Amino acid sequence: MLDGKRIWVAGHRGMVGSALVRRLSQEGCTILTVDRQECDLAEQDQVRRWMHANKPDMVIIAAAKVGGILANMNYPVDFMYSNLAIQNNIITTAHDIDVQKLLFLGSSCIYPRQSVQPIEESSLLTGPLEPTNEWYAIAKIAGIRLCQAYMQQYGRRFVSAMPTNLYGPHDNFDLASSHVIPALIRKAHRAKIAGEDGMEIWGTGKPLREFLHVDDMADATVFVLKNYEDFEHINIGSGSDLSIAETARLVMEVVGLKGELRHDLAKPDGMFRKLMSADKLRARGWEPKISLRDGLATTYRWFLENVAD
């Protein structure tokens, strides 16, 4: 179904975008990419000029400003405005140039803080958001709604998929802005190199999180691109979760750090649980393939080869 198509991966240098490029290379399509120096996705004129010149048949929006709890709390304007600008520029221009299909990638943080678990797609907009990432979440919700508006008003095949917490090669390992798994990997590695007895994590360690390797996510995204055209967005997840403390201990095992897991109780826990229902996607025939332990091991090897200081 993708044979001969010109598919633009917006945000190809990020963790998600680079995984999508790897996965799409297995299809008979032409992959389009553009660097920020040539086209700043937050600038409408530049996006319009590039898309009109290159005329993609399909678009996957993997470009976004992302970060962990600390970054979201410190830079609400950046997280809201940048993401609104990027997605609005691409989606509106995709309509203008008659793109055949567009897939907008969001985040599990779109769901209310007190969602019934596992979180089904219908939970969207049924309650207040988690305050520690609401600015990013609001931008992503707006992207979903804009795709639905184009589908409703113009019959566009603009669909949305919501991945769970992702990790893998090309992740952001900066402790000031990273998500939980890359932060844990860097902390564990530094503690190991320094000869420390264990490491410290934020909060109680009790919150539960679902994780999916980015290569599984990329495979699911291609599956959705081929097989999904419903008005409602669709979740992409592993279907299981574990506590932050359990995740940290697993990271310590993979890294080879022995000792105690300590807690900084002055730091926030964030949303207590966030497990998405993957029933809709699995009912269509897709399943993840990479276990968390194996995924952490390959991610740590990539970290050692490309990031470790």
Image (cartoon, helix red, strand yellow):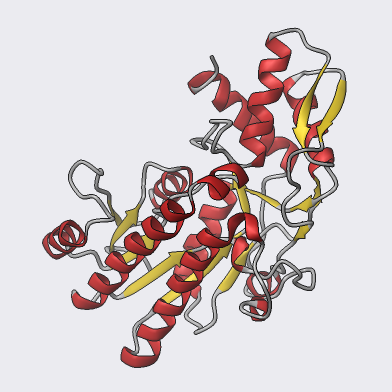
Looking at the image, which residue sits at the far top? 195
Which sits in the foreground, 250 or 78?
78
Which sits in the foreground, 24 or 257?
257
Residue 45 spot, x, y in % from top left: 15, 61
The residue positioned 77% from the left and 38% from the top of the image is: 266
Residue 138 spot, x, y in % from top left: 51, 67
Looking at the image, which residue sits at the far bottom? 153
Q: Does 132 sit above or below residue 292? A: below
The residue positioned 13% from the left and 65% from the top of the image is: 52
Q: How many marks can you see?
A: 0
Q: Is residue 284 left or right of residue 243?
A: left
Q: Does 11 sit above or below residue 189? A: below
Quadrant in which the C terminus is drawn: top right
Which sits in the foreground, 201 or 117?
201
Residue 102 spot, x, y in % from top left: 36, 70
Q: Does 302 sit above or below residue 49? A: above
Residue 135 visible, this orientation = yes
Quadrant in which the N terminus is drawn: bottom left
